[in-house]
Image: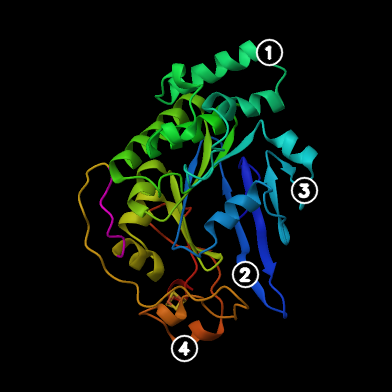
Amino acid sequence: MTDASRLVELRNLTKFFHIGRGEVVHAVDDVSFGISAREIVGLVGESGSGKSTLGKTVLGLHDKTSGDVIYNGEKLPAKYKPADFQRHARVMQMIFQDPYSSLNPRMTVGEIVGEGLKLHTSLSGAQVRDRVGEWLRRVGLNPDHMARYPHEFSGGQRQRIGVARALVLEPEFVVCDEPISALDVSVQAQVVNLLDELKESLGLTLLFIAHDLSMVRYVSDRMAVMYLGSLVEVGPADRVFFAPKHPYTELLIGSNPEPDPRTERGRDATAIRGEIPSPVNVQPGCRFANRCPKAMDVCEATTPELIPVRDLGHDERLVACHLYG
Ligand code: SF4
């Protein structure tokens, strides 16, 4: 399922953490998919599914255990050196999950947003200030407040500062790591609308990580569902949301009791039984087997491959489940 025409291509990307006594955390295990230029791919799954580790590994914030990330035809290093971060900062950025802890409380907002410009461009101090002011305006903040500190802003405003900090260098590709999960529902909608607008005006390509599928559906072109380090379903966002094929996706959508942030209507909750298992020393077989209401004998022994599945002419519907083998 690799495709060289994508802007970002993951090929068998794997990130394991060795935690001693021979134990290995399979955080990201053999993940392959691509993101086209100007596309938004929503990456969803429960906490502990490996979504954030995947995003950080793509950007070189974690070393790769194996596999590759190809960006615009160039294979990125398995282990980043400082010069690699320097080289890629102009084109790849991350918006972090927590607007409270991801902003340095001792720096002013102007310093936070302008830091990347100082490090990665030759702009003068005045030009940096102008660019920071322009970006504060663009994300809906008052440029006159650039001398203030993060604690003087609300949660939603802090996430806008985080958005400005990530986008001030006008990157091509941004990983948004649960950018709204720490915010109130009404503020979530504002931040999502802002990202949507900026995506259009800047022509951004986004990997949007979230556990709230209803939100991801609004912003994404395609949705990728992750479970215990592996992808279990990939397809057009609306098709995955309204006609899920993998039993985990189906239960994940049903178990999402959070209201839709744009309509603020709640949805029925259907519990997924049990907890997501430990990602330590994962065994062969379907990783969802112990929670799956449709599990069969074959599921315990044989790992299902992510394969194309027929879906109303959508040729990019991929599912890893023996029901479709
Ligand atoms: Fe369920 Fe088997 Fe499909 Fe896994 S492979 S999701 S256990 S039916």
SS for tag 4?
helix
In the image, is residue 266 above or below residue 180? Answer: below
Figure disc tally: 4
Left or right position of 248 against 203 = left
Disc 2 or disc 1, which is closer to the eye? 1
Q: Which residues are magenta?
A: 255-261
Q: Marks 2/1: CA distance?
A: 46 Å
> Residue 110 placed where, x, y %?
55, 23
Circles 3, 2 touching at the beta carbon (< 8 Å): no
Residue at which label 4 appears:
297
The answer to which of marks 3 and 4 sits earlier in the sequence is 3
The crowd level at tag 1 (other Cα within 10 Å; few <14, some 14-19, many 20+) is few
Q: Marks 1/4: CA distance?
A: 66 Å
SS for tag 3?
loop
The answer to which of marks 2 and 1 sits earlier in the sequence is 2
Residue at x 77%, y 48% (from the top left corner): 77
Disc 3 or disc 1, which is closer to the eye? 1
Question: Quick check: can you spot residue 157?
Answer: yes
Residue at which label 3 appears:
77
Residue at which label 2 appears:
26
Q: Quadrant of residue 50?
A: bottom right
